[in-house]
Image: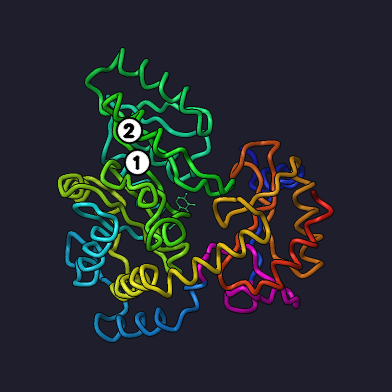
């Protein structure tokens, strides 16, 4: 039996070893790490809401009103007023009949997919789907089919062949609106047409679009007016919303089924009620004129670094792990925190820098980053 040390040595040899490095500051646009001040292009706080005073006040107010912990699973005694109010707010904002919250986006995916399908069903995933969607798919026991990234012709062919053999199966297409490591969008309108044509359902992870894209920041489905045609709209309060906690917006019946079957919901203590209380304030901010102004700032940052790019996630693909690590180290020496992303987060041979922009970045910091990136072009 190999010792863990041997496995670690093997990871290090292939440039795949990861380790934790602590920040000596809070996680804003400017951070301090190992004695150095850095511009932080590594966070998903796209609107800068993690440091917004209204969220901090709401969090504290929530603790005063509801205490610090939920003390039990939602199905036992942990279902408190802010949990329900937040779910009503989300359903209203997403144009769905209902919504259900989870302790994280990861828990939303790994809990809901196995609750929605089983071994006689089929999940059809985009090749670049996030790890939590892959893990949720595996846990479900359903047949997993994968289509090449954003390839609608292949998706259509796959759905045709699945339907020819399993006319009665529950078939769910699973994809993301903004891909987490590439920052590109899925061709949502064509995916909706395809799933409808084949009597399939659609599970859309809007993790990086929620708060960022669409009217009032309500995501790509809202941007395209397709919310009512998407069976499961998933998202998280951990990115643009500046907090944490996942959600799934869906019909009331699906929600009731999830409450009965989603194991990450049933067998896990409810998120702190104060967090749900603060999430309501975050949602309100995102949908307000403040949110609109922050999104405008964010769009200006995107335009200045990468004109025409559709999201604040901007990859610079370098290929080899060592190339990505060296580039991240060079940027760090220049005063920028930009993560090197490697296998298995991205496919082998596509190691990259992943830059994420925020409305909280001063324009000068983005200009300086652009100059620092120039040698890589
Ligand atoms: C971050 C992320 C998640 C997980 O959300 P958490 O709330 O951080 O657990 C799910 N899907 C995608 C695409 C993500 O990028």
Q: Position of residue 154 (x, y in %)?
A: 47, 22
Q: Secondary structure at mark 2?
A: strand
Q: Position of residue 336 (x, y in %)?
A: 73, 67
The Cα atoms of the two marked residues, 2 and 1, are separated by 7 Å
Decide: is 124 above or below 223.
Answer: above
Give the image quarter of residue 39.
bottom right
Q: In the rendered image, which residue does mark 1 sit on?
A: 203
Q: In the rendered image, which residue does mark 2 sit on?
A: 172
Q: Is residue 226 magenta?
A: no
The local crowd at label 2, few if under 14, some if 14 to 19, many if 20 or more residues have their Cα within 10 Å, is many
Question: Count of labels shown?
Answer: 2
Q: Which residues are magenta?
A: 23-47
The local crowd at label 1, few if under 14, some if 14 to 19, many if 20 or more residues have their Cα within 10 Å, is many
Q: Secondary structure at mark 1?
A: strand
Which of these two is toward me, 172 or 375? 375
* Mark 2 touches mark 1? (CB < 8 Å): yes
């Amino acid at each position: 039996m190999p010792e863990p040390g041997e496995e670690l040595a093997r990871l290090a040899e292939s440039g795949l070893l990861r380790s934790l490095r602590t920040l000596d500051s809070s996680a804003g646009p400017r951070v301090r790490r190992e004695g150095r001040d850095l511009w932080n292009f590594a966070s998903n706080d796209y609107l800068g809401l993690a440091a917004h005073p209204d969220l901090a006040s709401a969090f504290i107010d929530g603790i005063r009103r509801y205490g610090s912990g939920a003390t039990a699973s939602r199905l036992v005694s942990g279902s408190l007023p802010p949990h329900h109010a937040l779910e009503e707010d989300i359903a209203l904002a997403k144009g769905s009949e209902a919504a259900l919250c989870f302790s994280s986006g990861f828990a939303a995916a790994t809990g809901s997919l196995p609750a929605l399908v089983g071994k006689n069903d089929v999940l059809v995933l985009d090749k670049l789907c996030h790890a939590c969607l892959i893990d949720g798919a595996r846990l479900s026991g359903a047949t997993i089919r994968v289509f090449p990234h954003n390839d609608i012709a292949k998706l259509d062919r796959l759905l045709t062949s699945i339907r020819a053999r399993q006319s009665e199966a529950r078939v769910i297409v699973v994809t993301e609106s903004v891909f987490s490591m590439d920052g590109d969008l899925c061709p949502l309108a064509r995916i909706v047409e395809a799933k409808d044509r084949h009597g399939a359902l659609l599970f859309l992870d809007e993790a990086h679009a929620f708060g960022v894209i669409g009217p009032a920041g309500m995501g790509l489905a809202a941007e395209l007016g397709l919310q009512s045609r998407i069976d499961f709209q998933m998202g998280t309060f951990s990115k643009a919303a500046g907090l944490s906690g996942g959600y799934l917006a869906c019909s009331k019946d699906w929600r009731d089924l999830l409450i009965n079957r989603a194991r990450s919901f049933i067998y896990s203590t409810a998120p702190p009620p104060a967090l749900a209380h603060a999430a309501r304030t975050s949602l309100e901010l995102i949908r307000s004129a403040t949110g609109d102004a922050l999104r405008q700032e964010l769009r200006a940052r995107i335009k200045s670094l990468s004109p025409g790019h559709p999201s604040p996630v901007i990859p610079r693909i370098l290929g080899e792990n060592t190339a990505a690590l060296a580039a991240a180290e060079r940027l760090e020496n220049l005063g920028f925190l930009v993560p090197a992303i490697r296998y298995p987060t991205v496919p082998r041979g596509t190691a990259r820098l992943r830059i994420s922009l925020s409305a909280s970045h001063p324009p000068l910091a983005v200009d300086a980053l652009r100059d620092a990136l120039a040698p890589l072009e």
